[in-house]
Image: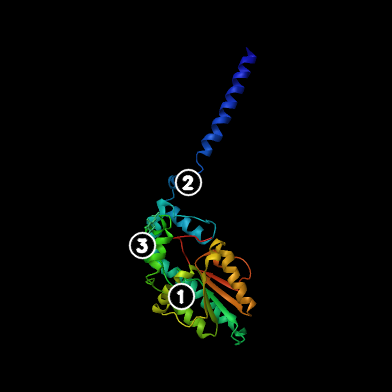
């Protein structure tokens, strides 16, 4: 009798062990997990707004990485933020920190034409917001064909604070380089767009050609900086909206991150 009971217990334990892994592995989908956690967070006294603000903040901290879409429950929140005065104010503050650095760093400029500064293009110099306004504010999986079709029209507006910064940096005697993940095929459209929005007098615009498209963006960008350093440039600063613009070597003396919670480029 005791032996039968033991057998029953063992059988029960085995059954449980078989069920448990099965039920947890059913939740492999990260979005389901996020959704579940967000419900948990809300019921623990945090609002959906708190949850989405934390998501956005952790994107900026580079804790949330490689997301393909903005979590569905946060697209309204992200839409509100990206079109808000707060977004503009956050960009402005980043630019002000950069201006502060410029007042301290640059006594050491040699004036030999080898002091360089780097900018990203999209959502640093010019804004893709008008496109994302019409395509779900990052809530839809990115359709590159459609985005590039929009870029071909050269209608991206300048980010006003960066435009001012660009001219200040140029005036200080830096050579300014743009390193972008845009493809070579968009060169004419990109140059048109930049000039139309008030950018002129840059020293180089690096775009991705076919062989760069298989590289991680951070490697492609680091290689572009390497070429500059090999040409004798000293890279003082990078202004960008993606962490992949700062990673790898050679780096810059300082980097300045602009907010962007619409998409993540790794
Ligand atoms: C992506 O955009 C293009 C151009 O607008 C469109 O023809 C295509 O159907 C879209 N693809 C998907 C998967 O939505």
Q: CA distance from mark 2 to mark 3?
A: 27 Å
Position of residue 225 in the picture relative to residue 168 (left or right): right
- Mark positioned earlier in the residue sequence (1 or 2): 2
Of all residues, the one furthest to the bottom in this rendering is 111
- Residue 123 is situated, as x and y percent measured from the top left of the image, at 45, 68
Q: CA distance from mark 1 to mark 2?
A: 37 Å
Element on which disc 1 rests: helix
In this view, the mark in front (2 or 3): 3
- Mark positioned earlier in the residue sequence (2 or 3): 2
Numbered tag placed on residue 37 in the rendering: 2
In this view, the mark in front (1 or 2): 1
Distance from mark 2 CB to nearest ligand 1 atom below 8 Å: no
Distance from mark 1 CB to nearest ligand 1 atom below 8 Å: no
Quarter of the image containing the C terminus? Answer: bottom right
- Residue 150 is situated, as x and y percent measured from the top left of the image, at 38, 66
Question: Which residue is denoted by mark 3 in the rendering?
Answer: 133
Determine the image quadrant of residue 243: bottom right
Can residue 137 be seen in the rendering of this structure? yes
Instruction: Count residues near mark 1 (Cα–Cα under 10 Å), then give few for <14, some for 14-19, many for 20+.
Output: many
Question: Which residue is denoted by mark 1 in the rendering?
Answer: 162
In this view, the mark in front (1 or 3): 3
Position of residue 21 in the picture relative to residue 86 (left or right): right
Element on which disc 2 rests: helix
Q: CA distance from mark 1 to mark 3?
A: 21 Å
Look at 42% across and 66% down and name the residue there: 87
Element on which disc 3 rests: helix
Q: Is residue 19 above or below residue 110?
A: above
């Amino acid at each position: 009798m005791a032996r039968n009971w033991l057998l029953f217990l063992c059988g029960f334990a085995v059954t449980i062990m078989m069920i448990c892994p099965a039920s947890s592995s059913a939740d492999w989908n990260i979005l389901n997990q996020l959704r579940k956690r967000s419900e948990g967070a809300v019921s623990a006294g945090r609002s959906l707004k708190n949850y989405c603000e934390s998501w956005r903040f952790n994107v900026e901290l580079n804790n949330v990485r490689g997301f393909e879409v903005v979590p569905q429950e946060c697209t309204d929140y992200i839409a509100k933020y990206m079109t808000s005065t707060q977004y503009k104010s956050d960009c402005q503050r980043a630019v002000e920190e950069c201006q502060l650095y410029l007042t301290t760093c640059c006594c050491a400029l040699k004036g030999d034409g080898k002091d360089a500064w780097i900018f990203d293009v999209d959502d640093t110099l010019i804004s893709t917001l008008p496109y994302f306004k019409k395509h779900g504010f990052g809530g839809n999986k990115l359709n590159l064909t459609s985005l590039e079709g929009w870029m071909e029209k050269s209608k991206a507006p300048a980010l006003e604070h960066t435009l001012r910064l660009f001219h200040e940096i140029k005036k200080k005697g830096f050579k300014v380089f743009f390193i972008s993940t845009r493809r070579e095929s968009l060169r004419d459209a990109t140059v048109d767009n930049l000039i139309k929005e008030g950018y002129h007098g840059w020293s180089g615009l690096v775009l991705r050609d076919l062989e760069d498209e298989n590289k991680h963006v951070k490697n492609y960008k680091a290689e572009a900086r390497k070429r500059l350093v090999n040409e004798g440039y000293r890279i003082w600063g990078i202004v960008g909206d993606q962490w992949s613009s700062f990673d790898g070597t050679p780096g810059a003396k300082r980097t300045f991150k602009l907010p962007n919670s619409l998409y993540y480029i790794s």
